[in-house]
Image (cartoon, rainbow, N blue to C red):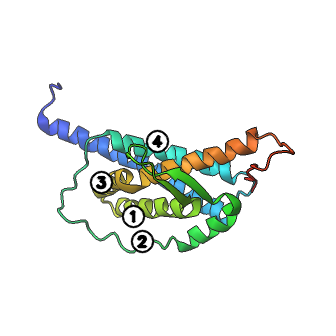
Amino acid sequence: MSDAPVSDQVVDEEDDLDEFATDVADQVESFLIALGAVARGDMPDGALSILLLEVSQLLLAGGRLGAIVDIVPTERFEPDAGMDPDADELRARLAVLLGPIDEYVEVFDPYAHEVEVEVSRLSDDLADVAADLYHGLAHYRSGRRVEAMWWWQYSYLANWGSTASSVMRALHSAIAHTRLDVEDDDSDAEVDVTL
């Protein structure tokens, strides 16, 4: 327990939250910039590797959000963050780029009593994650750091954390197939993941 007066502890906690908010915002912006560049085709030879790296870094920030106590905004209602960017163009560009590996299969809830396998698309999932992140970033850029952190934490736990985790598993699998699969003339189960 600290010997500092309670008011000093509150300031320290606010400073810590501001620093943490800056760290998360930096990671969010890095992810969104890289995702946009990949979707535009700026990195055709390294698209999968860049996506894997950026998603894993984003999940590190998300893990930090999930590991701390709940962030509770002072206002009861969320202030208007403005219009969220339309993710349809991003989604469409990623679908074209990812083509043959866009669709993947995953187990929806590993703790469910009955296993439910779902078909997902990397392009849809990446665009959905981006939409959640943009919303929090709008709060952050408007100076509402606590609101941004609340949004990122809540949406990490409710949506983008599990979605980004699924994307990371799919990207890892695609990269592993490109590097580890040995061509076998007798095999008809080859996965073509070259972009």
Q: Which residue is mark 3?
A: 150
Q: Which residue is mark 1?
A: 135
**Secondary structure category for the residue under label 3:** helix
Foreground: 136 or 144? 136
Label 1 crowd bin: few (<14), some (14–19), many (20+), radius 10 Å: many
Residue 75, placed above or below residue 51: below
Task: Tell me if 10 is positioned left or right of 29 in this view.
Answer: left
Can residue 34 be seen from the camera position used here?
no
> Quarter of the image containing the N terminus?
top left
Residue 155, placed above or below residue 135: above
- Name which residue lies at 53% across and 73% down: 88
Q: Picture quarter containing residue 180?
A: top right
| C-beta proximity under 8 Å, tags 2 and 4 | no
| Residue located farthest toward the right when viewing the structure as drawn | 185
Q: Which mark is residue 84?
A: 2
Q: Picture quarter containing residue 34?
A: bottom right
